[in-house]
């Protein structure tokens, strides 16, 4: 019976996002985790709802926040998802509690997946230092300045840190995210925080 179990059954995933999140990056990555059996919570800066966007400038949908970053405990989650959009991670990286939340996943050696502009949170927390990552191309210099190695690949995995460039990478990103999240605490990469 365990053979038919979904790979993320009994896993809880925190999805950290704010107003301006790119709709397709949020919805498709969340759906991939949920379809694999995970319980996913939308964590944000404030309670209520967040506004997603299409291509950064066109309002898309509103999504209910499950917990604020001040209410959420990283210890309650097995993995972290950071969708992009330019406004979303820019808001997050200005919030010290949100950055502490991100940093905690590295300190607790849990897998983290970030797509498009999502790696800005990794830059802000110092978590790209010594790692090889990809992102939307405009973050290349930020990543290099923060001590990371930037590569132009559909998906880059660096010991449990999964990164991708843009929405066209979502199928590959989601597949690797599920695979790495399933490994969970087998990840021993992030003790550098």
Image: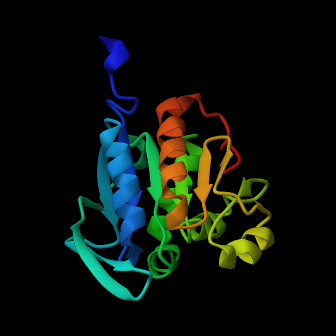
Report the side of 92 relative to 31 (left or right): right
Colour treatment of the image: rainbow
Asked whether the viewer can see residue 69, the reply is no
Asked whether the viewer can see residue 142, the reply is yes
Q: Residue at x 46, y 44 (%)?
A: 79
Across and down, in percent, residue 145 comes to 79, 73
Whether 18 is drawn above or below 83: the answer is: below
Q: Residue at x 41, y 42 (%)?
A: 75
Whether 152 is drawn above or below 75: the answer is: below
Across and down, in percent, residue 25 comes to 42, 64
Whether 9 is drawn above or below 168: the answer is: above
Number of numbered discs: 0
Q: Residue at x 39, y 43 (%)?
A: 77
Foreground residue among 100 and 158? 158
Report the side of 72 relative to 172 (left or right): left
Q: Residue at x 47, y 73 (%)?
A: 92
Give the residue furthest to the bottom.
57
Report the side of 165 relative to 38 (left or right): right
Question: Which quadrant holds residue 97?
Answer: bottom left
Question: Which quadrant holds residue 42?
Answer: bottom left
Question: Which quadrant holds residue 146?
Answer: bottom right
Across and down, in percent, residue 118 comes to 53, 67
Whether 139 is drawn above or below 110: the answer is: below
Across and down, in percent, residue 117 comes to 56, 72
Foreground residue among 28 and 14? 28
Give the residue furthest to the top.
1
Q: Quadrant of the N terminus?
A: top left
Foreground residue among 47 and 51? 51
């Amino acid at each position: 019976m365990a053979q038919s179990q979904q790979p993320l059954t009994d896993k809880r995933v925190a999805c950290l996002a704010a107003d301006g999140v790119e709709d397709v990056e949020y919805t498709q990555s969340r759906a991939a985790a949920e379809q694999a059996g995970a319980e996913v919570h939308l964590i944000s800066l404030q309670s209520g709802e967040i506004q997603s966007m299409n291509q950064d400038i066109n309002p898309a949908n509103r999504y209910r926040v499950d917990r604020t970053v001040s209410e959420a405990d990283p210890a309650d989650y097995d993995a972290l998802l950071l969708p992009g959009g330019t406004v979303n991670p820019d808001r997050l990286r200005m919030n010290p509690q949100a950055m502490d939340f991100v940093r905690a996943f590295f300190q607790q050696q849990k897998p983290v997946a970030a797509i498009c502009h999502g790696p800005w949170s990794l830059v802000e927390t110092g978590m790209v230092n010594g790692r090889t990552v990809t992102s939307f191309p405009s973050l290349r210099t930020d990543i290099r300045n923060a001590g990371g190695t930037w590569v132009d690949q559909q998906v880059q995995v660096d010991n449990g840190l999964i990164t991708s460039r843009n929405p066209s990478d979502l199928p590959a990103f989601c597949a690797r995210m599920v695979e790495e999240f399933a490994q969970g605490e087998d990840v021993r990469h992030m003790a550098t925080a």
